[in-house]
Image: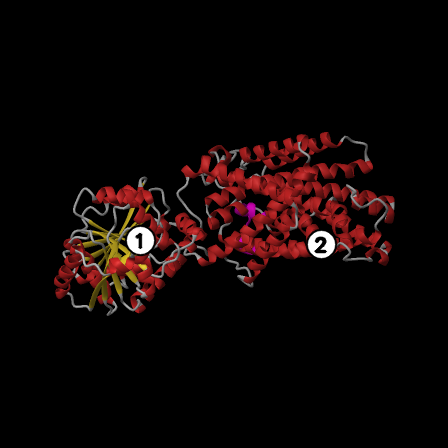
Amino acid sequence: MPKELERDLGLPSVLAISIGAMVGSGIFILPALALKMAGPAVILAYLLAGLLVLPAALSKAEMATAMPEAGGTYIYIERGMGPMLGTVAGIGTWFALSFKGALALVGGVPYLVVLFDLPIKPVALGLAALLIVVNLFGAKQTGRLQVAIVAAMLAAMVWFVGGSVGSVERQAFGGFFEAGGGGLLAATGFVFVSYAGVTKIASVAEEVEDPGRVIPKGMIYSLGFTTLLYVLIVAVIVGVTPEGIVGSNTPVADVAEATMPTTGVVAVVAAAILALVSTANAGLLSSSRYPFAMSRDQLAPPSLSTISDRFNTPTAAISLTGLVMLALIAFVPIMEIAKLASAFQILVFVLVNVAVVAFRKSDAEYEPSYEAPLYPWMQGFGVVGGLVLLTQMGWLPLAGAVVITAAGALWYYGYARRNVDREGAAADVVRRRIDRRAVEATSSTFRDGGDGDVLVAVTEDTTEERERTLLSVGASLARRDDGSVTVVQFDQVPDQTPLDYAEGVVSDADQRFEERTDRLVTDLDVPVEYGEVVSHDAARATNNFATAHDFDLVVAEPTTDDAVSRLLGDLFDDGADYDLVTVAAEDVDDLDTVTLVTDRGPFDPVKVTIADALAGERGGTLRLVHGIAADAPPERRESVVDYHDALADLCSAPVESRVVEGRDTPTALAEATHDSELVVAADDGDVVLQSAIGDRLSEGDTGLITVQPQGSRRPGPLGRLIERAVF
């Protein structure tokens, strides 16, 4: 029986871990630096940052009650947005928390220097080693330590505010907005990481008792309290403003020395040290859970999910995180990297807000015992606010976030991808939304169609058998919408031949065209007109004629002239207002099975109506074939089957559904057409699939109809990329 983490963290421990993770470097180190950016408006920056954190806190509280598992942010983004973004978030947040923990220790030691003459790095390394040992002994001991640290720290900070508020000078708040909106937003982004601890309890949610009640209360109470505490402390720092405080590494101690007796200064310095140690302790506790959770999901080596028999803690994950923190303290300029961690924290919180929307809209088994209020406006506020802050943080933090994101993506594609066969709720939401829109568009095409007028384009080289096939297809499509068929032979003459001369010449080919068309249309029960068009460029003439006469469909045979094919394709890509149907089949009158095939997303609506019209009139079966990868998650197959079922309700012909799975999807799809008389596919640029189908059809008597949808109905590059990603 596998080991599980013990649930023994109650509300006091949750509040202690959350507050302890927040009240650290964010208030004891950053205010003096942020004061340089925003001036007195730094007070408002802390308040605004707290408001922008609120949506992510509420979203994480909701998801934590639905998924109380170790890993927190990683779990929610991985389940909501997919394993790739989950890997990025897991690795990035793990590093960000490690950076913040190391910063807290390096930033805390200068407060010790106020009282004792000690070397900074050796002391910071010693404290880090001590915290690693404490965390290895178990979360219960850690939770109790957090309660003691936070209680002592808060008592001292209340003394600091009460003892210093009398020294606040009103004139210190003059020129409150001198730095402008840009300075305010830059400072808000800079201090944003001060609130990151509010959601850290979610990373140990698997160890929280009664998570549906304790986690939301813990996050909301700790955020409200900490925001108020930050605003009061920063207001005192700004209001007192002793000389040299701007840019100081110990702003709280500097203010205390100017306003409080020696005993008070000692108490405040002790509180700062406790707070910074608390931040590092909570950071180590929560960040070590990320490699643990990723290992359980096969996104990291299995050794990182090993739980100690003696202490019941993930010793490998804690040890690795501790080593990273020690290395950062010893070798890396932490203050600069902390800025990068802040930028990535904002980005992660944006993804958290998006993830809860994905869960709510998906068909996944998502049953939180707490639901975030004001959905989805609250999440929208968090997303927009976070993105605005990112634009104000400068290029270096953004570049660092991009590097961390790229590293996470490389790890996923290089190591983790082969180990997972699942996807996030967002992919299922997007896929089902695409399917739903495709079904609605197909239903509209069935219901409204067009005016039913079909142009059958032939040339002087078209044989009677080929024209018969083209007419049969054109008549079936026109009949569906009570339309008509116009057959036009497009004659091409050399550029040296004047068109007015060529127009008056009746060639043998012209006579044969008129005679055979007279014979072929006698058995058709739709109105048919026919004629000839002479031009120097048959492809351009076909396009111009179809556009000028408002045809909905153009039926033609594939040409062996590559130049003509490219030209007609170029003209069509410019945004034709008709659908181009090319027919490569000898006979379409006797059809038992018509197969629609794709592996790039939903079927084009016109492709469905064409296949249904041909199969329905001839008493055949319409087979819908979708190709998916062999390692595709079950949700992908389920959504494809649901989509096929919805199409079956619209079609007049009997419908058979097939989902083809395979490593070589194009070949597997081609094999699925072996017993069909006719295959209908889309000319969507999938050269591999078209080649595989073409090779397969060349071995037998199966015909092929290729549909190029009109330009206004084809998805753009981004749409095609999304379809490829979710199908």
Q: Where residue 664 appears, x then y in whole percent?
A: 31, 40
Which labelled disc corresponds to residue 537?
1
Q: Tell whether 420 sits left or right of 147.
A: left
Nearer to us in this view, 550 or 426:
550
Q: Where residue 105 appears, x then y in whole percent?
A: 70, 37
Nearer to us in this view, 190 or 20:
190
Q: Which quadrant of the view contains residue 452? A: bottom left
- The colour scheme of the drawn protein is secondary structure
Q: Which residue is mark 2?
A: 184
Residue at position x 62%, y 41% in the image: 283
Q: Tell whether 194 sits left or right of 545.
A: right
Could you tell me if residue 17 is visible in this image? yes
Residue 207 painted magenta: yes
Q: For the image shown, how many numbered marks are present on the structure?
A: 2
Q: Where residue 500 appears, x then y in whole percent?
A: 28, 60
Q: Tell whether 456 sits left or right of 299.
A: left
Q: In the figure, 294 relative to 553: above or below?
A: above
Dot 1 surroundings within 10 Å: few (below 14), some, or many (20 or more)? some
What is the span of residues highlighted in magenta in the rendered image?
A: 201-214
Nearer to us in this view, 39 or 700:
700
Amino acid on which disc 1 is placed: Asp
Q: Which quadrant of the view contains residue 605? A: bottom left
| Callout 2 secondary element | helix
Which comes before the other along the chain, label 1 or label 2?
Answer: 2
